Image (spheres, grey):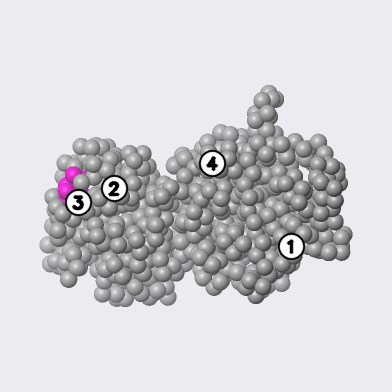
Amino acid sequence: MTEASTLPNSLRSYPDARGHFGQFGGRFVAETLMPLILDLEREYRAAKADPAFQAEFDDLLEHFVGRPSPLYYAERLTEHLRAQAPAGKGPKIYFKREELNHTGAHKINNCIGQILLARRMGKTRIIAETGAGQHGVATATVAARFGLPCTIFMGATDVERQKPNVFRMKLLGAEVQPVTSGAQTLKDAMNEALRDWVANVHDTFYIIGTAAGPHPYPELVRDFQSVIGKEAREQILKREGRLPDLLVAAVGGGSNAIGLFHPFLDDPDVKMLGIEAAGHGIETGKHAASLMGGSPGILHGNRTYLLQDEDGQITEAHSISAGLDYPGIGPEHSWLHESGRVDYVPITDTQALEAFQLCCKLEGIIPALESSHALAALPDKCMEMNEDQIVVVNLSGRGDKDIFTVAEALGVEI
Amino acid sequence: MTRLSVAFSSGRAALVTFVTAGDPTPDATGAILDALVAGGADVIELGMPFTDPMADGPAIQAANLRSLAAGTKTRDVLAIAASFRQRHPDFPLVLMGYANTMTRPTPGEFAAKAAEAGVDGVIIVDIPPEETDEVEAFRNAGIDVIRLATPTTDAARLPAVLNGASGFLYYVSVAGITGMQQAAQTTIEEAVAKLKAATDLPVAVGFGIRTPQQAADVAKTADGVVVGSAIVDLVAEHGADAAEPVRAYIESLKSAMMAARKETV
């Protein structure tokens, strides 16, 4: 881990005025969208400075989402991992219970923030992309709450694979638009959402689901998700009287991870671990680990690590977890990776499945497959960390949506 | 004078044509480019295929996928450009595409290779003026950086777009993706007049122009008429035999544009 003395004064002051996190981030969009992106930035600055905006955001998080989410001591998991560790090893493990939020994941935090921005900007139509459908459901939920028409772009293969979420979105009044271009998955859904947006800039607000895309999206999504880390910080101080030693979160685009990490970035004693989805293994090429198995490039409005070939053609991601199945990563993570502030490690489908089952049995919590990637990093960490140390894991979502995938992977018919 | 400025200095509107390199195959593209020249095109935009062409409509998306499926690599695109340059030493050739393929391995290395292949200009759709550092290398290599103006580019923003622009100004007449509907003629006239008041660069108008009549109408006000998806559709239909239909189509556009210009003189 990088020494505190080598860090800039504050790691929390990024991006710069041009939306750059070091060499990453930026605004790589077509000219048609550029004026709108600039408008959004102005409006976001104004909203941030407006106590009424913050008050409305807080109120909705409390009464509609159900925040604060608990910080829970995972006692049996802690004991289980201690039993396997050398004497004196095995830290206390806490879960930040984002899976208890309305709609079942952290995604809703960001959707609340963005729909308030949309209203502030006088936009009357909402669009979003979705992979497995979690962000689509969260977007459809806030659109219903505020009575705005909503179109969700979803790869045609995902529409077929994720029928329950498609139906949820429709129940919530959203139009689900299957995307048949390209590979028909999340990145193509994002392309199609951008195509829709460029043709409807006058009335449409694009609610991006992760801390990626053109500036100011990575910043504003992070800020809305930072409620996770702010609460966790307060809760652990109250509970343990000190900061945690390690934060762990899964990273696809990386919004749950940056939401947990960001409020702690300037605490040099708090280490951070981001978990990338290694699919069948980095060496097989079938993975979704942009940092571990990719290289910097430009896609969907930002410069960041991408899965791509030597010509810059984007390659398909693979992960058992649909929420991590994206060939890029938020630009702030790329920067935190290169600066060394956060460590990133890969976890395979198989490891995630094991952690999924362990969490169900030991804690009575069915975690999302995304969050299971974070849980799967714990055994190794527990071997090296002392008993008096503290780990906070972001349990970013619940796994009810994943039971069909898990059953199939385990060879169970339901 | 550069090849591009010659093309726009004839006193009549230039016909700017787009095809995707490597569609349907890298080997077939040369004949299609020759057909554009033979049919009367004045400028060629050679599209760099990309897996994620998010500013393009269905026609050009499909062309990108056909090209990539045929195995087109960046080196093939540059070879297509270089061999075109050998056959047509004076014909303006522009590379058009997306940042990720056009800045690899670095903007400098790509720009050097493009210059060596005889490329006159680049249009990089997803590099707006705000990220202008990325295109400095092209200017340094003597390649024009062609900027886009759109219906959302207002008067306050236009100077930023024009700052560092060269070759010509590409007016995207519709807020949307390529190959869809065309803007109303009066809207185009007003927009072109505003742009021409702000710059000495030639203004070419594109997006949704498909018929000889549309091309002729736009030719009355603009310095250039850009046609892309309609040509790409012909390539989709005729594949490796597209050269002759493309030549005939270009000729029909060009003669309509010439006639229109004469009426107004």
Q: Find residue B76 and name its label.
A: 2
Q: Determine if marks 3 and 1 fall on one subunit.
A: no
Q: Residue furthest top?
A: A413
Q: Which residues are drawn in magenta?
A: B31-37
Q: Residues within 10 Å of mark 3 (few under 14, many from 20)?
A: some
Q: Residue furthest front?
A: A87
Type of amino acid at the residue the image marks with label 2: Asp
Residue B204: quarter of image = bottom left
Height in image: A46 above or below A65? Answer: below
Q: Residues within 10 Å of mark 2 (few under 14, many from 20)?
A: some
Q: Find residue A270 and name its label.
A: 1
SS for dot 4: helix
What residue is shown at x 79% (from left), y 60% (from top)? A244
The Cα–Cα distance between marks 2 and 3, rounded to whole angstroms, is 10 Å
Q: Find residue B83 and name its label.
A: 3
Q: Is residue A320 left or right of residue B25?
A: right
The residue marked by circle 3 belongs to what chain?
Answer: B
The Cα–Cα distance between marks 4 and 3, rounded to whole angstroms, is 38 Å
Q: Position of residue B249 (x, y in %)?
A: 19, 46
The Cα–Cα distance between marks 3 and 1, rounded to whole angstroms, is 58 Å
The Cα–Cα distance between marks 4 and 1, rounded to whole angstroms, is 31 Å
Q: Determine if marks 2 and 3 fall on one subunit.
A: yes
Q: Is residue B125 magenta?
A: no
Type of amino acid at the residue the image marks with label 4: Glu
Quadrant holding the C terminus of chain B:
bottom left
Q: Residues within 10 Å of mark 1 (few under 14, many from 20)?
A: some
The residue marked by circle 2 belongs to what chain?
Answer: B
